[in-house]
Image (cartoon, rainbow, N blue to C red):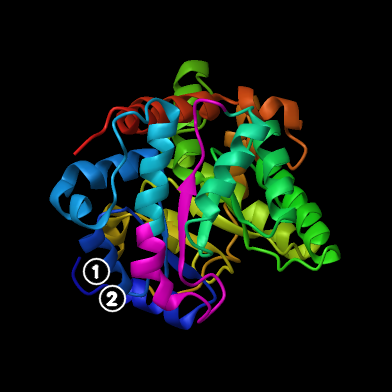
Amino acid sequence: MAENKYLKWLSSETASVYWHDSAIVEELDQAMENGAVGMTTNPFLIGATLKAQPDFWKRVLPGVPDDVQGDARAEAWIAQVTGWLARNKLGKLYGAAPYAGYVCAQTNPCRPGDTEGMIATARHYAAQAENIVIKFPATRGGLEAIEACAAEGINVAATVSFTVPQVLAMAEAYQRGREKAVAKGVKPGIGIAVLMVGRLDDYLRDVMNDTRVSATEADIIWAGTAAIKRAYKIFQEKGYDCVLMPAGCRGGYHISELAGAKMVMSIAPGIAAKLRDNTDFTEKIDNPVDPAIIDRLSEMPEFIKGYAPDGMTINEFITFGSCNRTLDQFVQMGWNVLKGFAF
């Protein structure tokens, strides 16, 4: 990654925070040179770095014994890789500024309703380093785990999250857990509500093509941006301690249209490259999405579910169209790979 003046501007001259979205060490080093102060990972990204750099990881990790199999094996690889990154790469930034020096580790995507299992995994990951953030799915089970872990002072994030109702529910769950931690004299960890803007666009594109509404591709690419802008306004009004994170971006516009927001932005190398030539150093978070675009998108009930604060109940989160396709990708392309990985 060459010098990226846009990312340097975003991370140093606005309220926005840049986290790198990849577990490849060299990519992280380059991102940090351009202002990244944290790292997001998922099972796929952990598998990708282990396969891409086996000699490096074999040298720095203890490895997983052959008799550790199944979900325990995948969990062990994630714990080891994120623990090493947290201690050896991001630890030097930890505490230097809010949201600086953190690494994300994700729970088992095969069991998005297993609250107790997620809590146990979170404790395992959190024991590796104090600057690890545990990612849970924004399902009923995941949100209950978030509240419980936040009450223990564990850093938490909700992922597999695509909608305004989900991030609002995450903020409320974190707030309840945080207040319990404070009441017990426990130092609260941070809370992050992910909104996977590009994955919302992907899903609604399929809905648009199938239902023949008047929305076009030019509208669809604004859906995720519209949702997170609406969520951000509500977060500001309510004064949540939780912070939003745009993720799953599909273009530089998913970041540039949010520039200046008090958000932690998950930016993959490909998106960073698309931002490299951006010379429009303008904070755009307060720029509204064209109401005509919102009107056309609103012809789809699925958009309303994702855009309206009360568009879904907590029991409906796991049935939203983007949820199972994303969980399946994390399982098939990440978790299952780690279950069978060996040096």
Q: Is residue 137 above or below residue 250?
A: above
- x 36%, y 42%: residue: 77
Q: Work out whether residue 277 can be spotted.
A: no
Residue 290, horizontal then vertical, whole percent? 57, 51
Label 2: element kind: helix
- x 47%, y 17%: residue: 210
Residue 246, horizontal then vertical, whole percent? 51, 53
Q: Where are the magenta residues, as a range?
A: 84-111
Residue 52, horizontal then vertical, whole percent? 17, 46
The magenta stretch spans residue 35: no
Label 1: element kind: helix
**Residue located beneath label 2 in the image:** 33
Q: Tell me, yes or no, whether the two marked residues, 1 and 2, touch with CB atoms within 8 Å.
A: yes
Residue that protrudes farthest toward the right in the picture: 183
- x 35%, y 77%: residue: 8
State the residue in front, 44 or 242. 44
**Residue located beneath label 1 in the image:** 30
Q: Is residue 6 left or right of residue 98?
A: left
**Cα separation between marks 1 and 2:** 5 Å
The magenta stretch spans residue 104: yes
Query: Which quadrant, please, contains the N terminus?
Result: bottom left
- x 54%, y 24%: residue: 213
Query: Which quadrant, please, contains the C terminus?
Result: top left
Type of the residue with mark 1: Gln
Type of the residue with mark 2: Glu
Q: Residues within 10 Å of mark 1 (few under 14, many from 20)?
A: some
Q: Work out whether residue 15 can be spotted.
A: yes
State the residue in front, 230 or 211. 230
Q: Residues within 10 Å of mark 2 (few under 14, many from 20)?
A: some
Residue that protrudes farthest toward the top in the picture: 210
Q: Is residue 108 left or right of residue 272?
A: right
